[in-house]
Amino acid sequence: MKSNQITLTFSSIAENVSIARLLIASIGGQLDLSLNDIEELKVAVSEAVSNAIIHGYKSNPNNIVYFNLEITKDSLIIVVRDEGCGISDLEQAMQPAFSTDPERMGLGFVFMQSFMDELQVDSKLEVGTTVTMKKHLKQTPISSH
Amino acid sequence: MNLEKKIERLTLLLRIDGELDMHTAHTLRQAIDNEIEKRGIRTVILNLQDVQFVDSSGLGVILGRYKKLLPLGGKLKITNVPPHIYKIMELSGLPKIISFYQDEAHAYEEGRGA
């Protein structure tokens, strides 16, 4: 797979979560990932983008979510960034079943962690949050054509 | 997301077609809560056969409806879960709390009494 980079910026509205999923599914297809891997990538992306909209921007639609994909020879790196409120207690936020909203399950980070090989969250109050997720790609033999 | 609704006495059956994420979660929540509040529905059966995607927002709505029905003496049942959707649900622990059935007939049958 050739190196590739895609950046998508979109409004912080719920409708755009499925657009981010479509993009990752399409990249997953190009990378010849299994359907199961693609499904897991879609969930991880969905969680990260939903968090940016719901928590980062407190569901205010007049903001921008930054979605960046980078494909290197051995990994797929997904970065979801918001310029929202930031997370005050990152350790607490990443605990399973922690949620600021009783209707939500607090599983966003659990899913991201389970489905990706690496997860890094950088957050600063009133500056924003950046979620970096990495999936290792199997080295494919060099094709003969 | 499309919802096909069937009401039989105090049981609401919803066949869900589409993706269950933060965008559609709101619609599903309202559809169920309306029936609970207006018609006094006490059993909600969700047929997930045609659900293509679910994330924690979708699971949150399902768990939320379970929690809403519980103090009312009601019940939430899930049927026809596709394998890839079940995997996500399993990771969330939902099957430990909510009853799953292979199809609608089994869900209707259980709890109806002899």
Image (cartoon, helix red, strand yellow):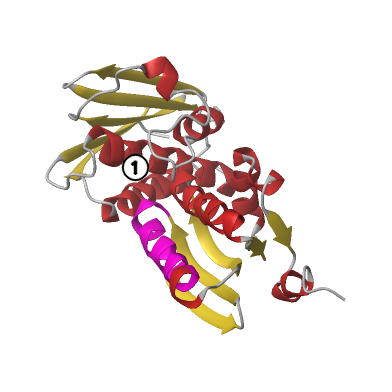
* Label 1: how many Cα within 10 Å (few below 14, some 14–19, many 20+): many
On screen, residue B112 versus residue B81, left or right, reads right
Which quadrant of the view contains residue B6? bottom right
- Magenta-drawn segment: B21-36
Side (left or right) of A35 relative to A50: right
Image height check: is B15 above or below A85?
Answer: below
Give percent across and percent down for residue A125: 21, 18
Q: Is residue B35 magenta?
A: yes
Q: Give the prevailing secondary structure in the magenta stretch.
A: helix
Q: Quadrant of the C terminus of chain B?
A: bottom right
**Residue at 67 percent of width and 52 percent of height:** B98
Residue at image location 49% in from the left, 23% down from the top: A95
Q: Position of residue B2 (x, y in %)?
A: 43, 73
The residue under label 1 is: A50
Farthest residue toward the left? A62
For disc 1, the chain is A
The amino acid type, in three-letter code, at marker 1 is: Ser
Residue at the (51%, 45%) spot, across then down: A38
Q: Position of residue A112 (x, y in %)?
A: 47, 32
Q: As drawn, which residue projects farthest toward the front?
A: B72
**Is A101 in the magenta?**
no
Quarter holding residue B105: bottom right
Whether residue A134 is visible: yes
Tell which residue pokes out farthest to the right in this image.
Answer: B114
Residue A137 relative to residue A69: left or right: right
